Image: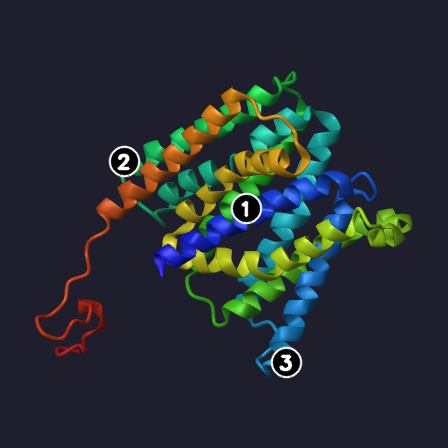
């Protein structure tokens, strides 16, 4: 299960990197928030249709409101808004660097609130990966002078790092699919006002040939990314799940090199290797610290799966 989830998360980061490359052309036609709102709303509605087709309960429970709707509004309505406002006030490099800090925020919060106690070398590996991301971003372009935009952009990693840890504390939902659907719907609704109402004239441009590939891939990703992330949080933990975000900058640059022929500097390749080595070290430290499953002789079942003879 763990290896399958890790492989799926790697595939998700690669798909997100490819989406980032396709978005380069798409956002020259439609505003970024309009594109993002459309894919989120479409994915949320398709998930609602899927639940209805399975004749499962669609109406959100009180737990869904707390675990899906509120985080969706916080992450997309507040977090994405902070990024967009920050881009209008400070340099894109500053925004990219600050926004990459969500896994570090998740690590800090997880330790503070007691959700996780990662091994020392897992923490070191995670920080090495963060250093690789910092180096990767700074190699491409220097930092701009710090200003209010940097402070506003901090809202995004704080929001998303908090969401990872919050959902880890909440534990197993009544329905993971329903939680995913309402998280997506809430996120789409939060983006709808700036994405649709303020850019209504751009809606017909969503059918432009330069937009449709990004929109189609974005909707497909939207159908699986939140479900996969929520599942990974339950199995791998908040911090390790969040750390996969560190791969996106390097994967996006690699996809841009393959698809668009954009150059990749040697220093960026070195920074990408540092990211990978840091994540591998962190994962190895967690695996070494995880106690092996014990079994009773002859039955082959994990100890946790045995019936309780006392209670």
Q: Secondary structure at mark 2?
A: helix
> Which residue is label 1 attached to?
14
Q: Secondary structure at mark 1?
A: helix
User: How many numbered marks, from 0 up?
Assistant: 3
The one nearer the camera, 87 or 74, is 87
Task: Between label 2 and label 1, give the one nearer the viewer.
Answer: 1
Task: Between label 2 and label 3, give the one nearer the viewer.
Answer: 3
- From the top left corner, tell me how far across and down residue 45 is, in percent: 70, 67
Q: Residues within 10 Å of mark 2 (few under 14, many from 20)?
A: few
In the picture, residue 21 is in which quadrant?
top right
Q: Is residue 146 above or below residue 201?
A: above
Residue occupying the far right of the picture = 201
- From the top left corner, tell me how far across and down residue 43 is, in percent: 67, 62
CA separation in Å, label 2 and label 1: 28 Å
CA separation in Å, label 2 and label 3: 47 Å
In the picture, residue 123 is in which quadrant?
top left
- From the top left corner, tell me how far across and down residue 249 is, in percent: 56, 35
State which quarter of the image contains the N terminus: bottom left
Dot 2 or dot 3: first in sequence order is: 3
The one nearer the camera, 285 or 160, is 285
In the picture, residue 126 is in which quadrant?
top left
Residue occupying the far left of the picture = 297
The mark found on residue 53 in the picture is 3
> Which residue is label 2 attached to?
120
165 left or right, relative to 46: left
Residue 118 visible? The answer is no
61 left or right, relative to 1: right
Q: Find out whether the residues at labels 2 and 1 contact each other: C-beta distance under 8 Å.
A: no
């Amino acid at each position: 299960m763990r290896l399958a989830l890790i492989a799926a998360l790697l595939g998700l980061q690669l798909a997100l990197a490819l989406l980032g490359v396709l978005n380069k052309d798409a956002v020259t036609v439609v505003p970024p928030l309009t594109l993002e709102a459309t894919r989120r709303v479409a994915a949320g509605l398709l998930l609602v249709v899927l639940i209805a087709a399975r004749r499962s309960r669609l109406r959100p429970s009180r737990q869904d409101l707390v675990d899906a709707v509120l985080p969706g509004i916080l992450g997309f309505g507040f977090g994405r808004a902070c990024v967009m406002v920050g881009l209008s006030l400070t340099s894109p490099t500053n925004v990219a660097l600050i926004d990459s800090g969500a896994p570090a925020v998740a690590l800090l919060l997880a330790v503070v609130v007691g959700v996780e106690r990662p091994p020392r070398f897992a923490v070191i590996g995670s920080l090495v990966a963060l250093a690789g991301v910092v180096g990767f971003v700074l190699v491409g372009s220097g930092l701009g002078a710090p200003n209010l935009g940097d402070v506003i952009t901090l809202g995004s990693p704080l929001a998303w790092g908090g969401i990872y840890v919050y959902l880890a504390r909440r534990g197993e939902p009544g329905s993971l699919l329903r939680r995913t659907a309402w998280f997506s719907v809430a996120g789409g609704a939060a983006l709808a006002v700036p994405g649709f109402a303020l850019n209504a004239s751009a809606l017909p441009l969503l059918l432009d040939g330069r937009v449709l590939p990004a929109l189609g891939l974005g909707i497909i990703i939207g159908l699986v990314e939140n479900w996969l992330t929520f599942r990974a949080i339950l199995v791998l933990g908040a911090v390790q799940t969040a750390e996969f975000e560190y791969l996106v900058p390097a994967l996006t640059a690699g996809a841009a090199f393959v698809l668009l022929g954009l150059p990749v500097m040697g220093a960026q390749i070195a920074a990408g290797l540092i990211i990978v080595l840091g994540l591998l070290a962190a994962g190895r430290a967690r695996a070494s610290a995880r106690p092996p499953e014990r079994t009773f002789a002859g039955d082959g079942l994990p100890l946790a799966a045995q019936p309780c003879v006392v209670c």
